[in-house]
Image (cartoon, rainbow, N blue to C red):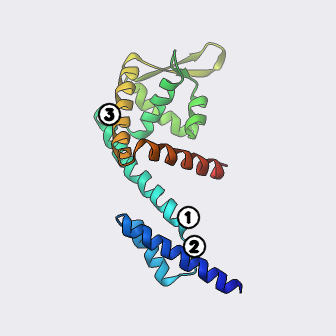
Amino acid sequence: MTFSRVTFLQVSCVRVDTLRMQREPADPVDVIIEQWARVRPDLDTRAMEVFGRIFRLSRAMGDRMEQAYKPYGISRGEFDVLATLRRSGEPYTLSPRELSATLMLTTGGMTGRLDKLERAGLLHRSPDPHDRRGLRVTLTEEGLRLIDEAVTAGLAQESTALSALDAEEAGHLAGLLRKLLDATAD
């Protein structure tokens, strides 16, 4: 009894997926799902369909964002440091520890990024007036100008990709991704 129920559900899911795939162009994830369906029809591959696309989208957009920031002489990681300082509001200052926590970086990884950005004149480090052992990291005027231009270039790339969806679809997708992210957060 249970076996026939499982078989019916599997056939039903495959039928729905096949109908959906006929309406939408196949992508590499569809090919992988079809391959699994042939060799392991017992698998429920819905999670693979979702996360396979999320991983591929992340990689593709990561590459696009690297290209968007390249004219500014910064990497995505360096963009993240500058953007975090910019989002902190005036005076665009945080401690290295606050930056590390926000960006989920080790202090060693953060030090390397700060060294490079300071040499480029995009930020400066100074003693923390409230803690003799601490430092403060502040955007320079050049850093502020650059991050404002770079964030605009990055958003243009993201907006171009998102233009495949209408506003309602984009809002719905954002809500679904937020729900999924909340469910998987540590």
Q: How many marks?
A: 3
Figure check: 46 above or below 102: below
Please give left or right for residue 171 compared with residue 179 in the image: left
For image coordinates 49% across by 64% down, the residue present is: 49
Please give left or right for residue 2 compared with residue 168 in the image: right
Quadrant in which residue 75 is drawn: top left
Figure check: 156 above or below 126: below
Which residue is labeled 3 in the image? 73
| Three-letter code for the amino acid on which mark 3 is drawn | Gly
CA distance for labels 2 and 1: 8 Å
CA distance for labels 3 and 1: 38 Å
For image coordinates 41% across by 29% down, the residue present is: 117
* Residue sitting farthest toward the top: 129
Locate the N terminus and report the quarter of the image it occupies. Answer: bottom right
Q: Label 1 near label 2: C-beta < 8 Å?
A: yes
Task: Please provide percent x and percent y for residue 17.
Answer: 47, 70
Count residues near mark 3 (Cα–Cα under 10 Å), then give few for <14, some for 14-19, many for 20+: few
Of the pair 71 and 119, the residue shown nearer to us: 71
Which residue is labeled 2 in the image? 44
For image coordinates 57% across by 45% down, the residue present is: 178
Mark before the other along the chain sequence, 3 or 1: 1
Quadrant in which residue 77 is drawn: top left
Figure check: 109 above or below 114: below
| Three-letter code for the amino acid on which mark 1 is drawn | Ala
Q: Secondary structure at mark 3?
A: loop
Residue 47: mark in rendering: 1
* Residue sitting farthest toward the right: 1
